[in-house]
């Protein structure tokens, strides 16, 4: 399923987020071609509705969609599994209404919990809200083919690409006459700068560029990426917001570096937090942390000017407040509504709810560091917690709009199916949990400190379930930023972490210990 934007009697489809829930279907193996192949640019209208994934990657794009005018209201993202696009039935620009022409003066006002945002630099950001900004301010070489096919990729900034028979070399031919918002032309040198900078910054998303050995500029319109070894998901990486192509000249003017020592020498982050250096449909023109991010239309966008003049993303951490603002007409888009709040909107005659499948993945993270918690460091204890979780109860909290993915992965990500979920997942089994605790020498149970994101539908469910088998836990409800920090430094148990795939590739969670 997918979210849809209905525009003036016709439909444009919004692609779903990159991680969680997931689509079913037969497994899809993705590997480099055994022979060279050339992929040509699709028709303009297909490119205009380009997929915004995330690192993307939730429903985060207005490329070619650019939404209808206010007072049309709501696009709602419901973690972990449900995407809702809510549009009021007012006549201004909805079904049967007129869609604003390119170059209009409309402003889209969004509400999103931005507490996790640490940076807007594409080479460093790895958070939910930041990806929306980068996907609209920057372009990538390729994008996924469609919302029905996340495993095939078509050219975007490139007009064609060719993969060598051994899968080590990807040669991209760039479009002619594409300019950055600055007016500088997009060239192979910019591609080289951007990809090597991502790799050499060694930031949170830098691991995605680990397969990259070198980037060779053949000429101004031709560039080749050379890999250390064949990597089936290289195109998926290149479609993500962290592989955004930056204006190398502009970035260097503000301290940017793609050198091997970029992790120490690059000084562009502060500038990139307030400005963008991309070719996307919008330009970042300001970020007031914990308040608002503002973007304006890029007049040089190669697919034509956006229908929106501005996007204003307000930092609203409370889902309840977002709902009130939608009902009052203060905002157009809400990102963080919970199932009960969505249910409360169903009776609103001015709201149409369109459901879609997301790829957000909610999982439980536990430290394995004995210095932080010697009990959780035991494999038997972590397995016991898996059996102690009431999975069906959590699904019920989402009004059964969620599905269980296999292990910590999402259904639909590189060949994973519902059958895999049934085969790999443990079932709720308190007796088995107690048996494993006894094997670990903890028949009387134990307690541990846990962090849980406030306002999530599973809030409290984990604590009650594990408490029933002797693992009560000391729950602390934290804002997204504090929760994420606890995850990164392993300072707490995290029973409700929501994560997006860096690419359509199960290896993004590969380093996690097997329970």
Image: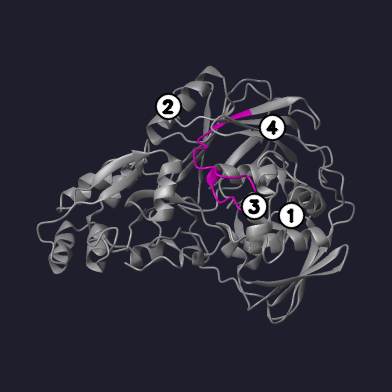
Which one is in front in this view, the residue at disc 4 or the one at disc 1? 1
The answer to whether residue 8 of the structure is visible from this angle is no
List the single residue furthest toward the left: 444
Q: Secondary structure at mark 4?
A: loop
Q: How many marks can you see?
A: 4
Q: Which residue is mark 1?
A: 245
Q: Which residue is mark 2?
A: 320
Q: Secondary structure at mark 3?
A: helix
Tell me: 456 left or right of 88.
left
Q: Quadrant of residue 240?
A: bottom right
What separation in Å lies between label 3 and label 4 (alpha carbons)? Answer: 31 Å
Q: Pointers 2 and 1 in contact (CB under 8 A)?
A: no
Residue density around tag 2, few if under 14, some if 14–19, many if 20 or more, within 10 Å: some
Q: Which mark is residue 457?
A: none
Residue 362 lies within the magenta run: no
The answer to whether residue 433 of the structure is visible from this angle is yes
**What range of the chain is rendered magenta?**
109-128
Of the image marks 2 and 4, the number of the one nearer the N terminus: 4
Q: Which residue is mark 4?
A: 9
Tell me: 85 left or right of 246.
left
What separation in Å lies between label 4 and label 1 (alpha carbons)? Answer: 35 Å
Q: State the predominant SS element of the stretch in magenta.
A: loop
Q: Which mark is residue 241?
A: 3
Q: Pointers 4 and 1 in contact (CB under 8 A)?
A: no
């Amino acid at each position: 399923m997918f979210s849809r934007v209905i525009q003036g009697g016709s439909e444009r489809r919004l692609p779903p987020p990159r991680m969680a829930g997931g689509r079913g279907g037969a497994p899809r193996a993705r590997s480099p071609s055994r022979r060279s192949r050339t992929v040509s640019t699709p028709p303009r209208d297909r490119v205009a509705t380009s997929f915004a994934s995330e690192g993307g990657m939730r429903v985060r794009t207005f490329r070619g969609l650019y939404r209808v005018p206010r007072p049309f209201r709501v696009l709602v993202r419901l973690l972990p599994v449900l995407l809702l696009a809510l549009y009021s039935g007012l006549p201004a620009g909805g079904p049967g209404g007129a869609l604003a022409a390119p170059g209009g003066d409309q402003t889209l006002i969004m509400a999103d919990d931005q507490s996790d945002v640490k940076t807007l630099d594409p080479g460093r950001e790895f958070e939910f809200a930041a990806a929306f900004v980068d996907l609209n301010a920057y372009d990538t070489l390729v994008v996924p083919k469609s919302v029905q096919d996340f495993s095939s990729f078509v050219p975007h900034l490139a007009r064609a690409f060719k993969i060598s028979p051994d899968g080590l070399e990807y040669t991209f031919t760039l479009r002619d006459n594409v300019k950055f918002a600055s007016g500088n032309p997009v060239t192979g040198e910019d591609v080289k700068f951007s990809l090597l900078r991502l790799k050499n910054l060694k930031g949170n998303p830098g691991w995605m560029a680990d397969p990259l050995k070198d980037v060779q500029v053949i000429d101004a319109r031709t560039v080749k990426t050379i890999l250390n070894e064949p990597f089936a998901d290289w195109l998926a990486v290149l479609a993500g917001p962290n592989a955004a192509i930056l204006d190398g000249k502009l970035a260097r003017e503000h301290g940017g570096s793609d050198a091997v020592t970029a992790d120490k020498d690059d000084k562009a982050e502060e500038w990139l937090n307030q400005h963008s250096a991309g070719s996307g449909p919008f330009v970042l023109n300001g970020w007031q942390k914990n308040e608002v991010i503002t973007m304006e239309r890029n007049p040089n966008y190669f697919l034509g000017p956006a229908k929106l003049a501005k996007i204003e993303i307000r930092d609203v951490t409370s889902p309840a407040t977002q709902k009130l603002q939608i009902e009052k007409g203060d905002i157009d888009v809400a990102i963080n509504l919970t199932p009960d709040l969505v249910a409360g909107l169903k009776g609103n005659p001015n709201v149409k709810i369109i459901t879609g499948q997301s790829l957000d993945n909610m999982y439980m993270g536990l430290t394995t560091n004995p210095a932080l918690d010697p009990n959780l460091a035991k494999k038997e204890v972590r397995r016991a917690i898996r059996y102690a979780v009431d999975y069906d109860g959590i699904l019920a909290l989402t009004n059964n709009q969620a599905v269980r993915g296999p292990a910590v992965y999402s259904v639909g990500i590189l060949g994973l199916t519902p059958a895999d979920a049934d085969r790999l997942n443990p079932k709720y089994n308190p007796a088995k949990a107690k048996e494993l605790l006894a094997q670990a020498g903890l028949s009387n149970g134990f307690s541990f400190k846990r962090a849980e994101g406030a306002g999530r539908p599973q809030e409290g469910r984990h604590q009650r379930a594990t408490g029933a088998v002797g693992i009560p836990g000391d729950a602390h409800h934290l804002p997204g930023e504090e929760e994420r920090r606890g995850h990164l430094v392993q300072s707490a148990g995290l029973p409700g972490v929501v994560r997006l795939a860096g690419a359509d590739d199960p290896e993004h969670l590969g380093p996690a210990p097997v329970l």
